[in-house]
Image (cartoon, grey):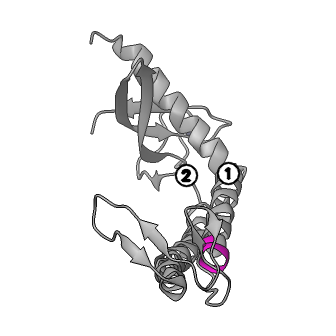
Amino acid sequence: MAVDGSNMAHAVIETAVKERTRLQTGRSRATALVVLVLLAGLGLFLALVVGKSDPTSAPTCNGTTMTRNDECRIWSNHGGGGTYGYQEMIDRRESGKGVWQVVGFVGTGLSVVLMGVAVTKLNPERPWGKPVTAVCPRCYQPNLREKLTVHTISRGRTNYRYSGIVTLCTPVCGFSAVRQR
Ligand SMILES: [Zn+2]
């Protein structure tokens, strides 16, 4: 695809400036934490509600609650079909729940670990990018920092990615540049 190089360079720089703003206002961290809290909650729900063991309540057979003398006939093309008694249907129900407990607790644990990562990595006190040794060509101060930045444009089903190493000075100075990796 033919692209206007200077427009793309500008778009990548704008993306970098927006990322820096999101980082420094703490908005990136707030968003990440909200998502992770929701995921942790979902994990607990799966582990404690969906996966809760319940070995005494009556099982159901095709949506109907069974009594002790009922039998349940299960048709299956994938194996596991057959006729099952009351206790066998309870066992079938309960054996599936262990998976949800594992999935739920692992999901919750991962979310908690990632919360710790988000708190430190997306700390607003942490400066954007890596320091550059050269002084800024505009304000002559050693305030330059740089970071690999990707700008994505969606056209229909295709995503176009433009990336470059963006160098930014302080917002007050406003100097910016982008170069290829
Ligand atoms: Zn500067």
- Mark 2: few/some/many CA within 10 Å (<14, 14-19, 20+): many
Q: Is residue 148 above or below residue 177?
A: below
Whether the residues at callouts 2 and 1 have beta carbons within 8 Å, the answer is: yes
Q: Look at mark 1 in the image and give the residue it sits on.
A: 24
Tell me where residue 10 appears, x and y as whole percent: 47, 22
Q: Residue at x 54, y 69 (%)?
A: 114
Name the residue at 47% across, 44% down: 135
Relative to 70, is 35 above or below?
above
Q: Ligand 1 closer than 8 Å to the CB at disc 2? A: no
Range covered by the magenta-colored residues: 46-50
Residue, x 34% and y 68% (percent of image)?
Answer: 81
Lateral position of residue 157 relative to residue 15, left or right: left
In this rendering, position of residue 150 left or right of residue 70: left
Residue 69, quarter of the rendered image:
bottom right
* x and y percentages locating residue 56 in the rendered image: 66, 90
Picture quarter with the N terminus: top left
Q: CA distance from mark 2 to mark 1?
A: 8 Å
Of residue 68 and residue 118, the one placed in the foreground of this image is 68
Instruction: Work out whether mark 2 precedes mark 1 in sequence or the reverse, and give the earlier one.
Output: 1
Q: Which mark is residue 128?
A: 2
Q: Secondary structure at mark 2?
A: loop
